[in-house]
Image: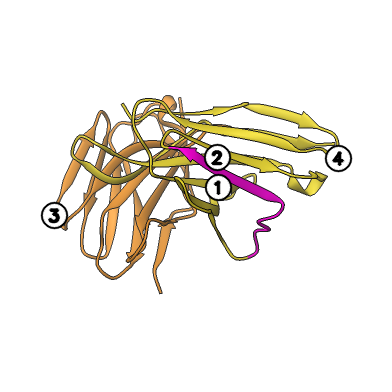
């Protein structure tokens, strides 16, 4: 059964304290893994997509990596404005639907 | 690129009335759009998949006669909540499947619509 699991559920960091968020997936024939950021009361904002194991993408303080079983979103020296919920998603094996993880709520304390 | 808008951003209505929410892809064509519902502190729950020119596909447990979806063009899908009741109060988010440079199969999300039914 296709599944996406994110951990931790919530993460509190001091400003400047680097950490990583995890997204584990079980889907046959991965057709991409997508990371989104969602602020309260807003729709998810597209961050990255990764298609093959070993691939990495960077955007400002964020770096996403992908293995055959999981993806990490590394946050380097986070700032309070990085506080948000980070969602990962994978497309189903056949079709257009996405399977979303439950998200990691990140709080960066000044 | 890949901008999706939703209108209205929030709506308050009386129980028993119908509410229409519009989702537009502003700078790309979307043959497939999705409608999600999100409760506080929970992840997105897919309600239906909408394909241009054909009937929407609803997820199990979603009443198609209550949540009417029309995808009349490549840039517009609408969700109508008919005879709304307080339990329909939620955050509704649409997304459009599109292609950005180097990005395949991505879903791009609208800003969401907060529906409150009194």
- Element under disc 2: strand
Magenta region = B61-73
CA–CA distance in space, label 4 to label 2: 21 Å
Please report the residue visible at 72 percent of the width from the left and 51 percent of the height from the top: B66
Residue with the mark numbered 4: B15
- Residue beneath label 3, please? A54
Q: Colour of chain B?
A: yellow
Query: Of B80 and A89, which appears nearest the observer?
Result: B80
Residue B97 lies, with reference to residue B24, above or below; the image says: below
Same-chain status of marks 3 and 2: no
The residue singled out by tag 1 in the image is: B36
Q: Which mark is residue B93?
A: 2
| Residue at screen point 55% across, 47% down | B36
| Mark 4–mark 1 distance (CA, rounded to whole Å) | 21 Å
Letter of the chain in orange: A
Relative vertical location of residue A71 with respect to residue B93 in this rendering, above or below: below
Say if mark 1 contacts mark 3, CB within 8 Å: no
Q: Quadrant of the C terminus of chain A?
A: top left
Q: Are marks 2 and 1 on the same chain?
A: yes
Tags 3 and 2 touching, CB below 8 Å: no
Q: Give the spatial CA distance, label 1 vs label 3.
A: 31 Å
Q: Earlier in the sequence, mark 2 or mark 1?
A: 1
Closer to the camera in the image, B54 or A87? B54
Same chain for mark 1 and mark 3? The answer is no
Asked if residue A40 can be seen in this view, the reply is no
Label 3: chain? A
Category of crowding for the residue at label 2, using alpha-carbon neighbours closer than 10 angstroms: few (below 14), some (14–19), many (at least 20): many
Q: Earlier in the sequence, mark 4 or mark 2?
A: 4
> Residue B116: percent from the left, percent from the top?
76, 35
Q: Position of residue B12 (x, y in %)?
A: 77, 30
Q: Residues within 10 Å of mark 1 (few under 14, many from 20)?
A: some
Element type at marker 4?
loop
């Amino acid at each position: 059964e296709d599944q996406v699991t994110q951990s931790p559920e919530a993460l509190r960091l001091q400003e400047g304290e680097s950490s990583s968020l995890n997204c584990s997936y079980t889907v046959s024939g991965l057709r991409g893994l997508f990371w989104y950021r969602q602020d309260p009361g807003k729709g998810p904002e597209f961050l990255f997509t990764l298609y093959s194991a070993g691939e990495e993408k960077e955007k400002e303080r964020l770096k996403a990596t992908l293995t055959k079983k999981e993806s990490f979103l590394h946050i380097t020296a986070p700032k309070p404005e990085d506080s948000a919920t980070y969602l990962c998603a994978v497309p189903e094996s056949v079709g257009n639907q996405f399977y979303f993880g439950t998200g990691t709520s990140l709080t960066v304390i000044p | 690129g890949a901008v999706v808008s939703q209108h209205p951003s929030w709506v308050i209505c009386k129980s028993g009335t119908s509410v229409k929410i519009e989702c537009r892809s502003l700078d790309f064509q979307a043959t497939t759009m999705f409608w999600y519902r999100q409760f506080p502190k929970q992840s997105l729950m897919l309600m239906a998949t909408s394909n241009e020119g054909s009937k929407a596909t609803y997820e199990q447990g979603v009443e198609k006669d209550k949540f009417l979806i029309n995808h009349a063009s490549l840039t517009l899908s609408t969700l109508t909540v008919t005879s709304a009741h307080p339990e329909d109060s939620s955050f509704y988010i649409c997304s459009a499947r599109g292609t950005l440079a180097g990005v395949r199969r991505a879903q791009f999300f609208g800003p969401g619509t907060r529906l409150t039914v009194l």
